[in-house]
Image (cartoon, rainbow, N blue to C red):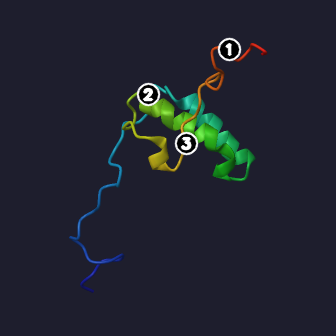
């Protein structure tokens, strides 16, 4: 047999599309990751129901240089609005 299981040898491996990124050794984003994974479990792995948590986790990693900063829209997501971001300077005032 001239070929090993899985195809010819020597073709080399291909690097991941996004490259490598550091592991979260100091558990800086562990809470966000666990919250997201719990949401997935609760919703039978339906990621669309946990999208805000996914965004929060990715933003945590980007803020701490655990992955390259990238527009979430390029990843198929829209940015998470900080709490109160939709309130203007006189949001509490009635006219």
Q: Mark 3 = which residue?
A: 78
Instruction: Say few, some or many: other residues with alpha carbon within 10 Å of mark 3 (under 14 / 14 to 19 / 20 or more).
Output: few
Per the image, label 1 sits on a secondary structure element best described as loop
Per the image, label 3 sits on a secondary structure element best described as loop
Mark 2–mark 3 distance (CA, rounded to whole Å): 16 Å
Instruction: Say few, some or many: other residues with alpha carbon within 10 Å of mark 1 (under 14 / 14 to 19 / 20 or more).
Output: few
Q: Mark 2 = which residue?
A: 63
Mark 1–mark 2 distance (CA, rounded to whole Å): 30 Å
On the rendered structure, is 50 left or right of 94?
Answer: left
The residue lying at 61 percent from left, 24 percent from top is: 85
Q: Nearer the viewer, residue 46 or 8?
A: 46
Per the image, label 2 sits on a secondary structure element best described as helix
Which is nearer the N-term, disc 1 or disc 3?
Answer: 3
How many discs mark residues in the rendered view?
3
Mark number, residue 90: 1
The residue lying at 58 percent from left, 32 percent from top is: 32
């Amino acid at each position: 047999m001239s070929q090993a299981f899985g195809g010819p040898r020597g073709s080399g491996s291909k690097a991941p599309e996004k490259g490598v990124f550091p592991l979260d050794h100091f558990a800086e984003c562990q809470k966000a990751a666990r919250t997201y994974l719990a949401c997935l479990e609760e919703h039978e792995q339906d990621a669309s129901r946990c999208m805000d948590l996914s965004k929060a986790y990715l933003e945590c990693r980007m803020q701490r240089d655990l992955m390259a900063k990238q527009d979430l829209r390029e990843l198929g997501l829209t940015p998470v609005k900080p709490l109160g971001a939709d309130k203007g300077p006189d949001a509490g005032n009635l006219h």
